[in-house]
C-alpha cells in the first residue's frame, strides 16, 4: 500500500516530509521540512503525519501573513547608497562574529582542514558567480538575512540590483577574510552598526534592525512553558525542574518577558555565561536544548515562525569522558572491606552497596536499571536464570520503573560469577521475607530515582576510602569496563549492544529481526571475564 502524502519510512521508523513553498524558501532557509515522527506503527504514523501536515500548513500561512504585514507597514522608503553600505556592514559583522565564535571554541586539525577546503570551494564559486554577474544566485541568502534581522527595504530596480551586487561582493570578501584567518592572519571583526544612518525599515512603527526589541507583548515564557508541558504531560519531574531552571537563568540574564524579544545573540550570551561558570559542554547542550524546545513547540503550535536557539554551536569538551576502571582499581574495590569483611556503605544502602557494583561489572547495567529492580525481575526462563530489565509492570500496584529508552528493555542472563557470589540465594531470602523489591532499603528521591542515595555513598567510598580520585572514574565506569571485557572476549559489537541495552545506532541491518536468542546471550555473557579478579562470596551457601 502506498504511503500517504508527506509520510515516508526510513528503516522501520516513519518520517514527515513536505516541500517548503517556493515563495517561503528564502524566509525559512530551507527547501524541505523533514523530521522523525518517532513511531514504527503505520496507523499512528498516518495520524501523526496528518497532524504535522496541518501544523506545517498553518505555519506557512502564519509566515505569509507576517511577511505581508511587514510589507504593508508605512510608506515605502527609497533604498539609497547609505542603506546598502549599512546592510553590507551588518552582514560582514554577523558573518565574521559567527566565524570568530567557532574558532574560539576550538577545532581539531582534521576539522580545520575540512572547513578550510569547504571555504576554498565556496570562495571559488562566489568568484565565478561575481565574474558572471549572476545576481539571482545571491537572492535567497539576501532575503533570509533581511528576514532574520527584521529588515524591510524598498527601492527601484536599479537600487535593488545594486544591493544584490554589493551583497555578493561582501560575501566574497568575507570568505577571503575567513581564509586569511585560516592562514593565521589577524582579521578583526568589525563592530555592529549601532545606530542606522538611513531608514532601512519601512514605516515609523517597524522595528529597528539594530536595536533589541523592548516590547513585552507576545508569547510569554510562562505560556510557552505551559504549551511545552501540554505537549508531553508525562515528562519526568526532573526534566520539568531542569527546564524551569534554564528558563529562570535565561530570563535573569536577558531580562526579557516574551520569546519574540529574544535574538540569536542572546542565546549565545546565555551559552557563554554558562561556560564562564565552568559548566561542561554536555550541560550547555542540554540547557540550550531546553530553550530550543520551547521555540519548537511554539512553532508547531503556529505561534512563532523562527527559532533563534536552533543549531547554536556548543564548544567541544577539552577533556576525555568517563574511562573504565583498570585492574588495580578493580582489585582495590572488590578486595576492599566492603567485599572481604562484610562492611556496608551505610544503613540506607545496605546490600545494594555490595551488589550494585558487582552486577554492573558482570552485566554492564546502568545504575538505575539495577537500583529499581523488583523481586519478580529475576526469573528462570528456559532453564536460564535471567534479569528482566524493563519498565513494564504486570502488577498495577508495583512501583513505577523507568529506562533510558525502549532499547534498554532486555532479558539478561545472569553471569555465573554472580550466581557463585550468592545473588540467587539473596533473592530467595528476600522472596521468603515477602519483599517486593530486590534492594528494599533504597528509597526514591523526589524524581523517582532509586539510585540517588547509593550513588552519593558509592562516590564517597570511591574517592575517600579507596582513593580513586580520577574524576573520569565513577560508577558508570564499570559499564565501560564491561564493554572492554566484551571486546576482550571477542564478542561483536551487535552482541555487546544487546547485552548492554544499546540501540545500535543507525545501522540498517539491526532494524530487522527480533534480536538474539536467550541461549546465544547466555553463551556470550559467560565469556566475559576478569582473570586477575577474585570475588569473595557475598551470601555463602
Image (spheres, rainbow, N blue to C red):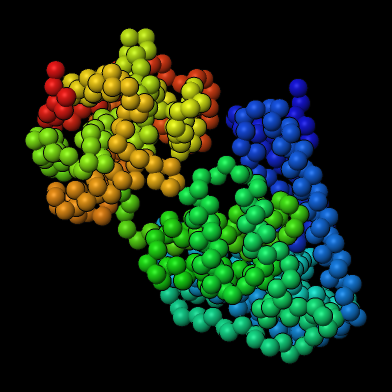
Residue shown at 35% from the left, 17% from the top? 379
List x then y, in percent, for residue 408.
Answer: 44, 32
| Pick the front one: 223 or 30 | 223
Residue shown at 71% from the left, 51% from the top? 300
User: Residue 48 lies in what quarter of the image?
Assistant: top right
Count of number-bearing discs: 0
Quarter containing the N terminus: top right
List x then y, in percent, for residue 407.
Answer: 47, 31
Residue most toward the top?
382
List x then y, in percent, for residue 100.
Answer: 50, 73
Residue most toward the bottom?
197
Residue 202 horizontal side relative to residue 114, left or right: right
Quarter containing the C terminus: top left
| Pick the front one: 130 or 412 | 412
On the question of residue 328 being in view, the answer is: yes
User: Residue 199 lies in what quarter of the image?
Assistant: bottom right
Residue shown at 41% from the left, 31% from the top? 501
Residue most toward the front?
433
List x then y, in percent, for residue 402.
Answer: 46, 36
On the question of residue 98 being in view, the answer is: no
User: Residue 141 lies in what quarter of the image?
Assistant: bottom right
Residue shown at 75% from the left, 41% from the top? 51
Q: Is residue 193 above or below residue 438?
A: below
Amino acid at each position: 500500500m502506498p504511503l500517504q502524502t508527506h509520510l515516508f519510512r526510513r528503516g522501520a521508523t516513519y518520517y514527515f516530509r513536505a516541500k517548503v513553498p517556493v515563495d517561503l524558501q528564502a524566509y525559512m532557509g530551507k527547501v524541505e521540512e523533514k523530521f522523525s515522527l518517532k513511531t514504527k506503527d503505520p496507523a499512528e504514523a498516518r495520524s501523526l503525519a496528518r497532524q504535522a501536515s496541518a501544523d506545517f500548513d498553518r505555519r506557512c500561512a502564519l509566515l505569509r501573513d507576517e511577511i505581508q504585514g511587514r510589507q504593508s507597514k508605512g510608506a515605502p522608503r527609497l533604498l539609497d547608497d547609505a542603506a546598502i553600505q549599512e546592510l553590507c556592514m551588518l552582514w560582514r559583522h554577523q558573518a565574521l562574529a559567527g566565524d570568530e565564535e567557532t574558532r574560539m571554541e576550538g577545532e581539531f586539525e582534521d576539522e580545520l582542514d575540512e572547513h578550510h577546503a569547504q571555504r576554498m570551494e565556496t570562495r571559488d564559486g562566489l568568484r565565478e558567480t561575481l565574474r558572471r554577474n549572476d545576481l539571482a544566485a545571491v537572492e535567497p541568502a539576501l532575503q533570509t538575512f533581511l528576514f532574520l534581522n527584521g529588515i524591510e527595504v524598498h527601492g527601484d530596480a536599479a537600487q535593488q540590483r545594486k544591493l544584490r551586487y554589493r551583497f555578493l561582493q561582501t560575501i566574497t570578501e568575507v570568505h577571503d577574510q575567513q581564509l586569511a584567518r585560516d592562514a593565521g592572519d589577524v582579521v578583526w571583526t568589525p563592530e555592529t552598526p549601532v545606530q542606522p544612518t538611513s531608514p532601512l525599515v519601512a514605516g515609523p512603527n517597524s522595528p529597528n534592525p539594530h536595536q533589541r526589541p523592548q516590547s513585552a507583548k507576545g508569547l510569554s515564557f510562562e505560556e510557552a512553558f505551559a504549551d511545552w508541558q501540554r505537549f508531553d504531560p508525562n515528562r519526568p519531574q526532573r526534566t520539568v525542574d531542569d527546564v524551569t531552571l534554564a528558563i529562570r537563568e535565561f530570563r535573569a540574564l536577558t531580562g526579557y518577558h516574551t520569546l519574540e524579544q529574544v535574538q540569536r545573540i542572546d542565546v549565545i550570551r546565555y551559552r557563554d555565561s554558562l561556560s564562564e561558570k565552568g559548566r561542561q559542554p554536555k550541560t550547555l547542550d542540554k540547557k540550550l536544548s531546553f530553550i530550543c524546545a520551547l521555540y519548537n513547540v511554539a512553532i508547531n503550535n503556529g505561534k512563532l515562525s523562527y527559532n533563534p536557539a536552533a543549531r547554536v554551536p556548543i564548544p567541544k569538551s577539552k577533556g576525555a569522558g568517563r574511562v573504565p576502571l583498570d585492574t588495580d582499581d578493580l582489585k582495590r574495590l572488590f578486595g576492599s572491606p566492603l567485599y572481604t569483611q562484610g562492611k556496608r556503605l551505610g544503613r540506607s544502602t545496605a546490600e545494594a552497596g555490595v551488589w550494585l557494583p558487582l552486577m554492573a561489572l558482570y552485566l554492564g547495567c546502568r545504575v538505575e536499571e539495577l537500583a529499581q529492580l523488583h523481586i519478580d525481575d529475576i526469573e528462570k526462563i528456559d532453564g536460564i536464570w535471567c534479569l528482566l530489565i524493563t519498565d513494564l509492570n504486570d502488577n498495577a500496584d508495583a512501583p513505577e520503573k523507568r529506562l533510558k529508552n525502549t532499547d534498554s528493555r532486555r532479558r539478561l542472563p545472569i553471569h555465573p560469577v554472580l550466581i557463585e557470589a550468592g545473588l540467587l540465594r539473596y533473592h530467595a531470602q528476600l522472596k521468603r521475607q515477602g519483599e517486593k523489591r530486590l534492594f528494599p532499603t533504597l528509597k526514591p528521591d523526589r524524581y523517582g530515582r532509586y539510585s540517588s542515595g547509593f550513588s552519593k555513598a558509592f562516590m564517597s567510598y570511591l574517592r575517600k576510602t579507596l582513593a580513586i580520585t580520577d574524576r573520569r572514574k565513577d560508577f558508570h565506569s564499570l559499564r565501560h569496563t564491561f564493554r572492554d571485557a566484551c571486546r576482550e572476549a571477542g564478542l561483536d559489537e551487535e552482541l555487546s549492544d544487546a547485552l548492554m541495552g544499546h540501540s545500535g545506532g543507525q545501522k540498517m541491518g539491526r532494524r530487522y529481526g527480533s534480536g538474539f536468542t536467550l541461549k546465544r546471550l547466555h553463551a556470550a555473557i559467560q565469556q566475559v571475564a576478569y582473570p586477575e579478579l577474585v570475588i569473595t562470596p557475598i551470601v555463602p551457601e
